[in-house]
Amino acid sequence: MTLFEELKWRGLVKDIAGDDIADKLNNEKITFYWGTDPTADSLHLGHYSSLVTAKRLALAGHNPILLIGGATGLIGDPRPTAEREIISKEAVEKNLEGIKKQVEQAFDGKVLVVNNYDWIHKFDLIDFLRDVGKYININYMLDKDIIRRRLDTGITFAEFAYTLIQGYDFLHLFETNDCIMQVAGSDQWGNMTTGIDLIRKKTGKEAYAFTMPLVLDKYGNKFGKSEGNALWLDKEKTTSYELYQYLINVDDEMVIDYLKIFTFLTKEEIEEFEQKNKEHPELREAHKVLAREIITDLHGEDAYLEAVSISEALFKGNIKELNTREIEMAFKGLTPYEIDSDKNIVDLLVEASICSSKRESREFISNGSITINGEKTTDLELKITKNVAIGQKYVVIRRGKKKYYIIMFK
């Protein structure tokens, strides 16, 4: 396959601007850019398809530029339903540095990272209206899908002007870096074509773009969201274990599409996993390789192996095999109940709200429904001490089959 054919096979091409875009990608070495606004100090899994696509183009010999919207981030692009909250300049700057570090690490430093604040802040209002606004017709802007959907509920001038700024970004990179192509998610199509039109009107030259379909689960929710919370690429915000658990549990009918989008496995390798997935879905081989490829790419092989080790230890009940850091990763979502002295197990279960009464506590223990660090106990006189705790710090209590609680010695 040619590069462009591979991109289409992987489901990475939706909208195209430029009739000879395939020829440009297949036969030339071009400079392209993709951008993101610094709304947080880390990218999340929803951004990962753009990041991987940019890496895919870079590996084919094209030159990537990441534009971080230090200017546009201060405004916020129009949302379908309501205006975004304004974030402070200090927060934008902090977020920008976090994202820049992530991207440079992902590309081993072989990427140009730019901040559109560096050129946008030099404009005064009159110059911007003359040099940019003069070239874009208001009817053209009103026809943009994201703007049209907001007309009934109302849209501020700041949001309305967002597409002009992003359009100028493309023109600026076209003129200063010979950047002739923009790559982005399909929700950015209107902004991308504004840039292409601006380049054509001001320079008389052609520019190119293609969008990628937004990656969704089978219910139409954005990939990388879990109960409204992003899965961050920063392993300090989302651990490798959390990422592993999410990826090995993605929908069976979506996993092959995700292998195409998010990994660098070949067509032949992916088709092999597709066949295995059909014949033995219970083995979840495609899911496991998806987790391996993404986590290794983001966090490294050691982090992936640690995530697998934690998962297997929990599945087998071998809690004592984990160290304190792994306990913290595995049970990140639980708030520990803190104690500062030895406790009788019956009393502790009540104090930590694991059981509602001493009577219930005794019943659960006697029935073998309580495990301490993976080991079942029926001892009503058991003392929970630092010597029982993992690393003399954590005690993992399980009630029944699935309810976990963490006891922490201060």
Image (spheres, helix red, strand yellow):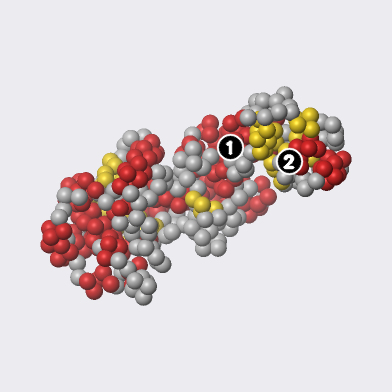
Where is 268 relative to 157, above or below? Answer: above
Residue at position x 49%, y 38% in the image: 236
> Nearer the viewer's eye, disc 2 or disc 1?
2
Task: Sort mark 1 into few (<14), some (14-19) or many (20+) by Cα contacts within 10 Å.
Answer: some
From the image, which quarter does the C terminus lie in? top right
- The amino acid marked with disc number 2 is Glu
Q: Position of residue 154 (x, y in %)?
A: 34, 71
Residue at position x 19%, y 61% in the image: 198
Observer-nearest of 54 and 270: 54
Instruction: Identify the element where label 2 is drawn.
Output: helix
Quadrant of res 141: bottom left
Task: Sort mark 2 into few (<14), some (14-19) or many (20+) by Cα contacts within 10 Å.
Answer: some
Q: Is residue 34 left or right of residue 213?
A: left
Instruction: Identify the element where label 1 is drawn.
Output: helix
Q: Which mark is residue 342?
A: none
Residue linked to disc 1: 329
Observer-nearest of 331 and 177: 331
Residue at position x 35%, y 51% in the image: 87
Residue at position x 79%, y 40% in the image: 370
Q: CA distance from mark 2 to mark 1?
A: 24 Å
Q: Position of residue 126 (x, y in %)?
A: 13, 60
Residue linked to disc 2: 351
